[in-house]
Amino acid sequence: MIEFKNIVKKFGDKLVLNDVSHKMETGKTNLIIGTSGSGKTVLQKCLVGLFEPDAGEIIYDGTSFTQMSEDDRKLLRQQIGMLFQGSALFDSMTVEDNIKFPLDMFTKDKQQEKLKRVNEVLERVNLIGSNKKFPAELSGGMKKRVGIARAIVLNPKFLFCDEPNSGLDPQTSMLIDKLISDITRDYKMTTIINTHDMNSVMEIGDNILYLKDGKKEWTGNSKDIIFSENKNLNQFIFASEFLQDAKLHRMMEAKK
Amino acid sequence: MNLFTHIGKYLLMLKGMFSKPENPKLYWKEFMHQCSEIGVGSLGIVVIISFFMGAVSALQAVYQIVNPLISKTIIPQIVRDTVILEFAPTLICIVLAGVIGSKIASELGNMRVSEQIDALEIMGINSKTYLVMPKIVAAIVMIPMLVILSMVLGIAGGRITAVASGVVSAETYDRGLIELFLPYNVFFAMMKAYTFAFIISSVPAYFGYNVSGGSLEIGRSSTKSVVVSCVLILVADYILAQLLL
């Protein structure tokens, strides 16, 4: 579980995160949602230590991350996997080498064992046979799946995903969502996803934190959203007429 | 950002490079890769420039020394001393600042913009140790070797053209080369090569590592890193000459 309390982050005079607190639960897909510029990415970067919050505390499974030494943070980071918005695959390495890189760096396994593990995670993300391809040869969806494979290769306890659906078609987005959701349950990870994809919110949102202008505006799950009367949340989630109709449909279904 | 902020961030980056490698094998592999990129990758341009640099110095020495009272052995001595003292270490390093410097800055800049550096940090890897340190060490190992090669090729280029011009015989040229030779000059040139190698690798690494923005910024930082490296090489050249000669 990851808990953060009263997180404040400023860039110059601009207050980006204003006293944000929440708990991210284990074995669930925890979503941080909000409009562009609401502070989702900054919050996620604070949680993994790429940014230092100006105030507040971050706690990983009862241990304070904010007060940890740099060496302890490095050890903890070996239990963290992250899928970046642009996948952040190493251009000069093949898919296999990209996935094997954390294993080479942190394990003393034999080469054959490492390759076996690489093939296991490639199978998990449905990319068997892509071992020798370079990132430039992959589609956006494939890159994301390789990014997920690299993130889970060390069996992390915590998985962070920064807008995993950005730039993907709806069908591939759904596949990625399902993959992340299944991995979260199968490996009992604490998964934190930044998204403004409404499909993700409705399909895999076990625990949702809605940020507005850097402040916590609403929390709940995908079922609670349907019945929420929060005006800002409704404007954000059900922005189009189509989505408003979908909401009515879901409400009727839920009442049945 | 003002100059002092840049200097402070540059020093912090250098300080941050020193940490225990997670897996020394991978760091060694990266170091060897950088040696190949920096050393072998720059070999062609160093060979061409050095040869013509020596050839032109020999021709200019022949052109200026027309007095029959002056010994012809002065021509190889001029070529030898200009090549060893200035052309091989300084000129070659300025060229390498463009070749290697822009490559380092754009490579790291691209890794920063595409979040590959963040990915390393999230994995628990010190990105400065893994990415910057091997580049600087490889440059310090390979660039002095390139400078020595440049000295040899420059002097050889001078010999070929001086002999071909018919003014100096091969024997006279060879005799002139060993007359009044000061081994200290080679030591001085190597001191310059090590200093410039550090500048050529660390300054572009700083600019590349700290890029923010998009592809336009990568190009800008690459250009800026080459300009700053060249200016620093000239300043260091002056300081070393003042201190060591």
Image (tube, coloured by chain):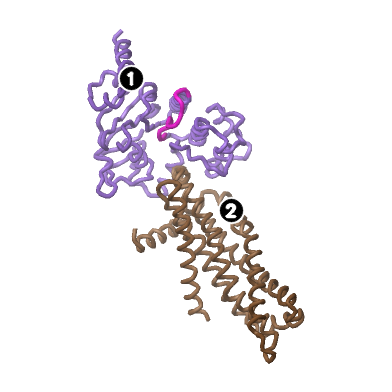
For the residue marked with disc 2, what is the amino acid?
A: Trp
Q: Residue A71, how many percent across, how many down?
A: 42, 49
Find disc 2 in the rendering and name its residue. B28
Which tint is chain A? Answer: purple
Mark in front: 1 vs 2: 1
B92 sits left or right of A14 in the view:
right
Disc 2: host chain: B
A249 sits left or right of A231 in the view:
right
Nearer-the-camera pick, B137 or A171 = A171
State the extent of the magenta-drawn residues as a range. Answer: A160-171
Label 2 sits on a secondary structure element that is: helix
Q: Quadrant of the N terminus of chain B?
A: bottom left
Q: Is residue A114 above or below residue B104?
A: above
Chain identifier, brown in the render: B
Q: Residue at x 57, y 49 (%)?
A: B26
Q: Residue A183, how many percent across, how many down?
A: 47, 27
Q: Residue at x 76, y 81 (%)?
A: B169
For the residue marked with disc 1, what is the amino acid?
A: Leu
Find disc 1 in the rendering and name its residue. A243
Disc 1: host chain: A
